[in-house]
Image (cartoon, rainbow, N blue to C red):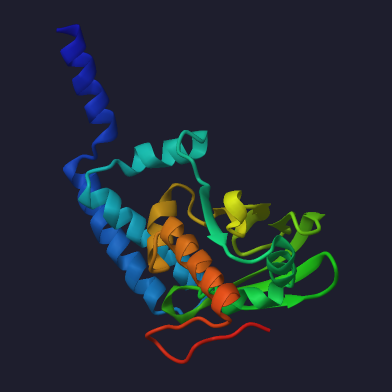
Amino acid sequence: MASTSENNQNQGQTEASETERWASLIGGGAMVLMGLSQRSLRGVLTAVAGGGLIYQGATKQSTIKQAQQAITGSVSQAIKVEKTVTIDKPASELYHFWHNFENLPNFMKHLKSVKVYDAKRSHWIASAPLGGSVEWDADIIEDRENEFISWASVEGADIDNSGFVRFKKAPGDRGTEVKVVIEYNPPGGALTATFAKLFGEEPEQQIGDELRRFKMLMEAGEIATNEGQPRGGQ
């Protein structure tokens, strides 16, 4: 009996009441509409937050419980993705192409542009939902020629993020293994899943697609797409 009572209590703590559920759906819908009317980062974040409320209401997740989890840190706010691809090119060639961050938009579709300021700092502009953009400056944290590059956004970034790329000789003289790890903290805390899906792809799928295009670009010299003309590197 005690176990049943405890289970019912736990369920009541995590499941929203009907009143709270409808408040989430209505309030979330209003926030989405408001966000869609603003073609700005603030509008995007408003729509994201609204989408999260709608999701919580539709799945009967308690908004109070979600808020408590976000505050206490019991829900991970970061999105971390790891992907590896083998490319039939020497590590030195791949390293030098990647090291010029201005080359990255050639195969990373979500990047509008990267401007390199100096040997350490660069400015990144990425596409956001509703035709908007997000921007940040990033610094190179560690740089080992032909082996490893890591970077991280600086204070004031629209989206805090960091990552690294590692170049390692593949077994059997098959070229180079390229491993990419990217971590970012989208605005909205526990609403990271909603945020990620608004960009059209799950983060893991997105990075996988970008590495596939990188492989195609480095091995064939161009990226053949169904959306337009092939894109070449610099």
Name the quarter where the N terminus is drawn: top left
Q: Residue at x 50, y 45 (%)?
A: 77
Horizontal side of 92 relative to 73 (left or right) equals right
Which residue is located at x 55 percent, y 58 percent?
Answer: 86
Q: Nearer the viewer, residue 119 or 174?
A: 174
Q: Position of residue 30 (x, y in %)?
A: 31, 67
The answer to whether 109 appears left or right of 91 in the picture is left
Q: How many marks?
A: 0
Q: In this view of the protein, which residue sits in the foreground, 95 or 25?
A: 95
For the question of whether residue 117 can be seen, the reply is yes
Looking at the rendering, in which quadrant would you find the C terminus?
A: bottom right
Quarter of the image for residue 38 reads bottom left
Picture coordinates of residue 62 (x, y %)?
A: 30, 41
Q: Position of residue 31 (x, y in %)?
A: 36, 65
Q: Is residue 53 above or below residue 10?
A: below
> What x and y, as percent, mark residue 56?
29, 49
Compared with 111, 67 (above or below) is above
In front of the other: 60 or 126: 126
* Residue 112 seen anywhere in this rendered image of the structure: no
**Residue under the image location 37 percent in, 73 percent down:** 34
Q: Residue furthest right?
A: 119
Name the outermost residue toward the front. 172
Q: Residue furthest top?
A: 1
